[in-house]
Image: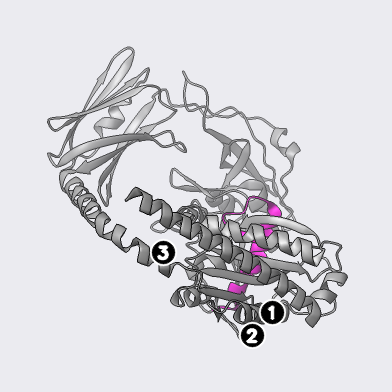
C-alpha cells in the first residue's frame, strides 16, 4: 500500500457528459482521477458554473479515509488520522474536530456542499486544501491539471424522463418527475382524480416508470408517448385538490406540490383567522409602537473569561479592550440619555456563550444590540488598520468570511458546539428575510456610527460590511458588530490599549447612538401619522 509521501492527486476535467440530446447542457458531470502510488482511481465530479466539485465519498475512498454518512440529517464525516471532518448538504461550513483534544473549529467554504443523487460534492480546490492542512499527502489541484488528459464521456441516457417519486410534506405531498435535462414547455391539469402532465419534445423511459410502486396517493400511472410530446397520467387520491408545478434548478427535475383538501381547508381557516385579527391588531398598533421606543440598548463586550480573543503585538487582549469600550459607552448612554436603559451581556471578565448573549438581549426586550470587538491579521505586526461595522448576512468577500470565522472561534470554549451546526447558508438567508424589519434599522445605525467614527477618530473607515457572526444570530432586534481597530497594528494597539483611546471610541459610538435614536423615533412617529391617515 502506498505511503502518504507516495500519494499524488491528479484531477483532470475530462470530456463532459451531457444530460440531453436535444437541449444545451445545463448541469455537467465530470470525471476526476485520483492517483495513489501506481494506482489510479476514477471518482465522481460535478461542474457548476465553472466550479469543479469532487465527490466527498469517492475522494475519501480513493485515499483510504473511512467515512460515515448520516442520511437522515444529510451529513457525511471523513475520518482522517488525527481529525474528523464533517460536511453538511447545502452548507458552506466544515466542522473539524481534533481527535486528541476533542476540540472543534469551523471552516467556511466559498461554495456550499452540493447533494445530488445521494452523493455529497465539495468544491474541489477549497476542500482539498483543507484536508491537506490536516493530513499532508502531496495532494495538489492546479488549473493546468484540468486539461492533462481526456477520457470518453459517459454515455448520456436517451430518455428525458427516467422516473417518478413521491414524498410526504407537511401540507400534502411532493411528486418528483425525474429529468435528465431542463425540460421545455410543460402543462399540468388536475381533473376528477386524474393528474395530466404533458411535456413537449420529450421522451419517457416507460420501462422505468412502470416499476414505480403505487400507493394510496399515486394509484396508477399511464404513459402516452407521442412523436412531439409525452403525457404522464396519474390517478391520484380523491383528497388531492391542487397541484402546483416548479422546476428544481439544481437537478432539472419537475416538482409538483400536491395539496390535500384538508391542508387547504386548514390554510383557508388560518387565513380567515388572520384577517379577523387585523382590526384588533390595528387598534393595538399605537401601543406596540410605544413599546418599540428605543428604551433598551444591549452592549456586548466580545469574548471574556477563558476566551481572550485576539492578542496584540505587545500582548493586549481583545477581551480587555472590548470590555473597556463597552463600559465607557454604557456610562455615556446612562448619563446623557435618561430614558434609555443599558444592559450588558457581561460587565466583568467572565465567559458568556455566544447563544446566551442573544438570549440576554431578548430577555431584556432590547431595541439595539451592539457587539464590540477588535480585529487582527495572522501576521503580526501588520500595517492593516481601521475600523469596520458588520451586519448579519452571509459573507460576500473572503476578508469578511475570515473575520467572521475568527470571531466565531469563540465556540471552541463552549460545552455544546453542535447547536451551531444548523447555521447553514440557507439559514442565514432565511434569517435575513425574517429580520427584514430590523435590518433597515441595523443599516441606519451602522451608517451613522461609521460616519461619526471616521470623522472623530481620524482613522481608516473600512465601511459597513456583512458576514455571518454567530453572536448576532439570536438577537431579535437591530444589531451590529463593531471591529474597533487592529491589535496587529502597533499604532492602533497602543490606542486600543489606552484608557483615552477607548474613551474616544466610546464617545464616537455614543454620538452614533444619539443620532440613531433621533432618526429612529422620527421614523416611528412618521409611521404613526401614516397609519392615522389610513384610518
Which residue shows up at 69% across the image and 47% down it?
9
Q: Is residue 73 left or right of residue 311?
A: left
- Which mark lies nearer to you, 1 or 3? 3
Residue 408 shown in magenta: yes
The mark nearer the N terminus, 2 or 1, is 2
Q: Is residue 193 left or right of residue 295?
A: left
Secondary element under disc 1, as helix, strand or loop, is helix
Q: Is residue 386 left or right of residue 443?
A: right
Which residue shows up at 87% across the image and 71% down it?
490
Residue 396 point in image, percent of width and height:
63, 50
Which segment did they paint magenta? 390-414
The secondary structure that most of the magenta stretch takes on is: helix
Q: Nearer the viewer, residue 395 or 31?
A: 395
Residue 134 shown in magenta: no
Circle 3 sits on which residue? Answer: 289
The mark nearer the N terminus, 1 or 3, is 3
Q: Nearer the viewer, residue 199 or 45?
A: 199
Q: Nearer the viewer, residue 391 or 131?
A: 391
Circle 1 sits on which residue? Answer: 319
Residue 133 point in image, percent of width and height:
71, 61
Residue 81 visible in the picture = no
Secondary element under disc 2, as helix, strand or loop, is loop
- Tell me if label 2 and label 1 are in contact, CB under 8 Å: yes
Q: Residue furthest top?
A: 227
Which residue shows up at 14% across the image and 42% down it?
239
Residues packed near mark 2 inside 10 Å, few (<14), some (14 to 19) or many (20 plus): some
Secondary element under disc 3, as helix, strand or loop, is helix
- Tell me if label 1 and label 3 are in contact, CB under 8 Å: no
Residue 382 point in image, percent of width and height:
85, 64
- Tell me if label 3 and label 2 are in contact, CB under 8 Å: no
Amino acid at each position: 500500500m502506498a505511503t502518504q509521501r507516495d500519494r499524488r492527486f491528479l484531477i483532470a476535467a475530462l470530456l463532459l457528459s451531457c444530460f440531453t440530446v436535444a437541449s444545451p447542457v445545463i448541469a455537467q458531470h465530470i470525471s476526476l482521477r485520483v492517483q495513489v502510488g501506481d494506482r489510479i482511481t476514477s471518482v465522481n465530479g460535478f461542474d457548476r458554473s465553472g466550479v469543479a466539485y469532487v465527490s466527498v465519498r469517492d475522494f475519501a475512498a480513493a485515499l483510504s479515509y473511512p467515512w460515515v454518512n448520516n442520511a437522515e440529517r444529510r451529513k457525511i464525516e471523513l475520518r482522517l488520522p488525527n481529525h474528523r471532518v464533517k460536511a453538511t448538504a447545502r452548507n458552506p461550513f466544515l466542522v473539524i474536530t481534533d481527535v486528541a483534544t476533542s476540540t472543534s473549529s469551523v471552516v467556511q467554504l466559498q461554495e456550499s456542499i452540493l447533494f445530488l443523487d445521494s452523493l455529497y460534492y465539495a468544491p474541489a480546490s477549497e476542500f482539498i486544501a483543507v484536508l491537506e492542512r490536516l493530513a499532508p499527502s502531496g495532494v495538489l489541484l492546479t488549473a493546468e491539471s484540468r486539461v492533462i488528459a481526456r477520457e470518453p464521456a459517459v454515455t448520456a441516457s436517451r430518455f428525458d424522463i427516467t422516473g417518478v417519486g413521491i414524498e410526504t410534506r407537511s401540507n400534502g405531498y411532493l411528486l418528483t418527475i425525474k429529468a435528465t435535462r431542463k425540460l421545455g414547455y410543460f402543462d399540468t391539469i388536475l381533473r376528477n382524480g386524474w393528474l395530466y402532465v404533458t411535456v413537449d419534445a420529450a421522451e419517457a423511459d416507460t420501462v422505468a416508470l412502470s416499476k414505480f410502486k403505487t400507493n394510496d396517493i399515486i394509484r396508477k400511472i399511464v404513459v402516452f408517448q407521442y412523436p412531439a410530446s409525452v403525457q404522464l397520467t396519474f390517478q391520484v387520491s380523491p383528497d388531492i385538490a391542487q397541484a402546483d408545478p416548479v422546476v428544481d434548478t439544481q437537478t432539472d427535475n419537475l416538482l409538483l406540490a400536491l395539496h390535500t383538501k384538508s391542508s387547504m381547508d386548514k390554510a383557508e381557516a388560518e387565513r380567515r383567522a388572520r384577517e379577523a385579527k387585523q382590526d384588533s391588531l390595528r387598534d393595538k398598533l399605537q401601543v406596540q409602537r410605544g413599546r418599540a421606543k428605543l428604551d433598551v440598548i444591549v452592549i456586548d463586550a466580545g469574548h471574556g473569561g477563558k476566551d481572550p480573543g485576539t492578542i496584540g503585538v505587545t500582548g493586549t487582549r481583545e477581551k480587555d479592550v472590548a470590555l473597556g469600550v463597552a463600559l465607557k459607552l454604557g456610562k455615556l448612554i446612562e448619563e446623557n440619555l435618561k430614558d434609555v436603559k443599558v444592559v450588558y451581556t457581561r460587565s466583568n471578565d467572565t465567559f458568556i456563550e455566544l447563544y446566551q448573549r442573544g438570549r440576554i438581549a431578548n430577555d431584556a426586550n432590547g431595541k439595539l444590540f451592539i457587539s464590540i470587538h477588535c480585529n487582527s491579521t495572522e501576521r503580526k505586526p501588520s500595517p492593516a488598520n481601521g475600523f469596520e461595522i458588520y451586519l448579519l448576512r452571509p459573507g460576500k468577500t473572503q476578508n469578511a468570511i475570515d473575520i467572521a470565522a475568527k470571531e466565531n472561534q469563540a465556540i471552541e470554549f463552549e460545552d455544546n458546539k453542535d447547536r451551531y451546526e444548523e447555521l447553514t447558508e440557507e439559514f442565514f438567508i432565511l434569517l435575513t428575510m425574517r429580520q427584514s424589519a430590523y435590518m433597515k434599522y441595523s443599516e441606519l445605525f451602522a451608517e451613522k456610527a461609521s460616519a461619526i467614527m471616521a470623522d472623530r477618530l481620524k482613522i481608516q473607515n473600512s465601511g459597513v460590511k456583512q458576514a455571518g457572526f454567530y453572536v448576532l444570530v439570536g438577537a431579535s432586534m437591530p444589531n451590529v458588530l463593531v471591529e474597533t481597530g487592529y491589535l496587529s497594528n502597533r499604532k492602533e494597539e497602543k490606542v486600543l490599549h489606552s484608557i483615552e483611546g477607548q474613551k474616544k471610541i466610546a464617545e464616537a459610538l455614543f454620538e452614533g447612538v444619539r443620532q440613531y435614536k433621533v432618526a429612529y423615533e422620527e421614523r416611528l412617529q412618521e409611521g404613526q401619522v401614516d397609519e392615522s391617515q389610513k384610518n
